[in-house]
Image: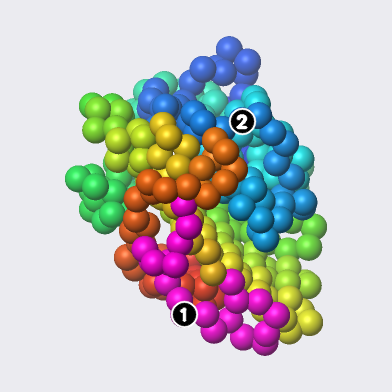
Amino acid sequence: MRKLAFLSLAALSLPLTLSVKSDLSNYSVGARLRAAESSALQVQKAMAATVLDPSTMNLGTVGGRADFIRFLYFMVVGPTADYSIPNGPGPEGLVGVIKQVMGSQGIGGALYQMGYTDCASIPSSGSTSATEGAETFTISFSTPAKTIPAHYGSHGGGSYSKSVSISVNSVPMLKTEFNCESSGVSSGYVRLTASEDDGARDMELHFLRDVTGQDGFLDFYMSYAGSSYTEKAAVQFKTNDETNYDLFLFRNQDNSAGNDEGSAFGLQGNASTGLVKVHYIFDQGDANLDNTTAIASGSSECISLATNNTSAGCGNIAAPSNVTLGTSFTWTIDSLADLTLNSF
């Protein structure tokens, strides 16, 4: 069994980091995992420089909704240098989470230090542990159990080839399954839990990038349980041609005072024209989440991110079908309330 070459993990919160030597900074599991940050997941060409502060966005105006559309987009791909989001997502959004987990500062760097210098050499069984102070870190290898989501185009339903897990004092913290890159295709699955001051946040991610087919997919699911509130969120992003994209965000929060609130946004955008069709629904201020309205093609508006005004020329929003995690989620606010994540 190879010796575990790292002894320090950052606090159990994002970004997750593993101790990595500086000369390994360019390593990642599958050289093209970094292709997730490709032209297919870049900023709208028609956006003007601005500061986006979620705490001051006003959905009551078209300009406010345009800024919120930008915020949702950057939450997935990360903002460019022209944008500042003081209270928003990290510098690289959800794509950055994938890079942190899989790249040189995460599993990729740790595996490299352990001697697995190419993806094919990663084993399908066994484990290695290291102890630092009162904490024992264990990295384990197994046969993958997940499959690529069915809605990931021609790749849907395919199997992953590697499975790696990390636990701390026998408590599962991170699991990832992925494929060794083949023909420009990078794909994987991440399940992690992050302890915070007031609770625990559990997350799941699926992603796939096909450079040849110009496809990009990302699915994100999160559940948070704190002492004063609980929260769940689901995000789905896809592009099939590096120009047109769909982005869906559903979120709900149950406060200790008994007031539940939820929101849903559906976007269909064109990165060349800067036109985005947006549909949004809310369920706020009552004791129960009971909004069964699904994001659909009707009751939407077309917004130009070049002018911050309404426009014509948008396409139709194509709502996702059911997605199954621990339970089936039908892309409505109340259905999200019943969502459970998969175990480790």
User: x, y (%) of residue 135?
Assistant: 70, 47
Mark 2 neighbour density, 10 Å: few (under 14) some (14–19) many (20 or more): few
Q: Is residue 119 magenta?
A: no
Q: Is residue 266 left or right of residue 183?
A: right
Give the residue at mark 2.
Answer: 48
The magenta stretch is 282-302
Whether residue 306 can be seen here: yes
Residue at image location 34% in from the left, 68% down from the top? 322
User: x, y (%) of residue 178?
Assistant: 36, 41
Give the residue at mark 1.
Answer: 292
User: x, y (%) of residue 28?
Assistant: 46, 26
Mark 1 neighbour density, 10 Å: few (under 14) some (14–19) many (20 or more): few
Q: Are marks 2 and 1 in contact (CB under 8 Å)?
A: no
Q: Measured along the vertical axis of the image, is residue 137 above or below residue 26?
A: below
- Secondary structure under badge 2? loop
Name which residue type carries label 2: Ala
Magenta segment, prevailing SS (helix, strand or loop)? loop
